[in-house]
Amino acid sequence: MSNTARRRKATISIIGDRFMLPSMFEKAIREKCGGDLDIRTHELPWPDEPMHHGYTVPGMDGLKEYQGTVEEVVRFAEGAEIVVTHLAPFSAGILDRLPDLKLIAVSRGGPVNIDMAAARARRIVVVNAPGRNASAVAEFTIGVILAETRLITRGHDGLRRGVWRGDLYRADLTGEELSELTVGIIGYGHVGTKVVRLLKAFGCRMLVTDPYVQLSVDDLRDGVTQVPLARLLAESDVVSLHARVTGETRGFIGARQFAAMKRGAYFINTARGPMVDYDALTEALKGRHLRGAALETFAIEPTPPDLELLRLENVTLTPHIAGASIKTVAYAAAAAAEEVRRYLAGEGPLNPC
């Protein structure tokens, strides 16, 4: 710990929630920084209550996946030089009411709850925690691929209803082993690379598409092949989505892409819902062009109760929990604490947004 960090006095507002606990943020910051720190904490009710999107709330345009009201955030952040948060929103209007604010540490991969243009205009540094839950999401992805391809969900649902699905042992119903399948990975960032690393142990054939990355020497040695999206869709038995939502990827998996997939293939989404046309996916599943899907994220969350996709038998469904692990919490808290330490010590940020 630097002498500068020891002597530096700062007011820090921690706005956590019931996943990224304020107490874990505070513990990590005090361990990293020591010093004479004035720390105040507040806990938001996520995930017990859903997040919001700025297009539905006046004055919050452009913000998404956030929780907390304007008055709530201003009340707990007022007078603070540093804010550490997970989901608290920072719109232009909120930032105008926080003239002392100099650093926002966001414990997530993308600062979608921050008006970045407004922060830059006010010379407020925003830092994030890229890859914070990549390991958790990658492991979860392997789990849902197995649950869907080996009919684990079907057996579970049957037993819950009091039905013994012995028929799932039939040769015309049972699934293939991963070692016999070709798995296509769309998006090769923090999560996609970890999914491939785990898949290598299963011995499956692996295809990757991502126009912005190149395969590593290890990947090339291990037989991973980088291909265009069209070839990946045509050759993969399992297609797993791991891209980020951008103007380029929003809605880019739709009816044409599902029709291009092999008949009997599986579609996996543990990334984000806005990249997928779920009406088109529903039709591909109903018509049995796709044998199944495993879906962790949706276009609207929480999902509408009358969503037809929720009633299909050939789908494994989870409520956006892939990134939830204790390791994620500890990693993200430590990353935020290190950014606070660096700021107090007069060092540059590790992960500026």
Image: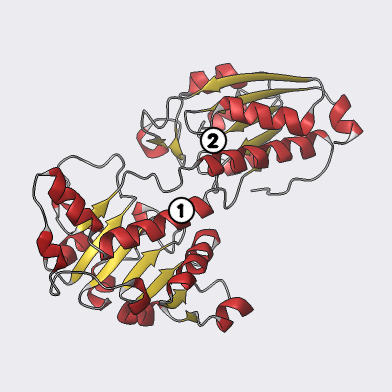
Q: Earlier in the sequence, mark 2 or mark 1?
A: 2
Q: Is residue 41 left or right of residue 260?
A: right
Q: Are marks 2 and 1 in contact (CB under 8 Å)?
A: no
Q: Position of residue 125 (x, y in %)?
A: 69, 40
Residue sitting at the far right:
3
Q: Label 2 is placed on what type of residue? A: His
Residue 352 spot, x, y in % from top left: 68, 48
User: Pointer 1: residues within 10 angstroms few (<14), some, or many (20+)?
Assistant: many
Front residue of 46/87: it is 46
Q: Which colouring convention does the figure follow?
A: secondary structure
- Marks 2/1: CA–CA distance: 18 Å
- Residue 66 lies, with reference to residue 81, above or below; the image says below
How many discs appear? 2
Identify the residue at horizontal 29%, vertical 72% (top origin).
257
Mark 2, residue position: 86
**Residue sitting at 73 percent across and 27 percent down?**
30
Q: Is residue 159 visible?
A: yes
Residue 168 x/y as whole percent: 14, 64
At x 84%, y 38%, the residue is 346
Along the viewing direction, whichever of 85 and 207 lies nearer the viewer: 207
Which residue corresponds to mark 1?
137
Rendered image quadrant of residue 31 = top right
Q: Give residue 178's position: percent from left, percent from top.
A: 35, 72
Q: In the rendered image of this protein, does residue 205 appear above or below residue 251?
A: below
**Can you say which quadrant of the picture contains the N terminus?**
top right
Residue 81 appears left or right of 208:
right
Give the residue type that dot 1 points to. Val
User: Mark 1: which secondary structure?
Assistant: helix
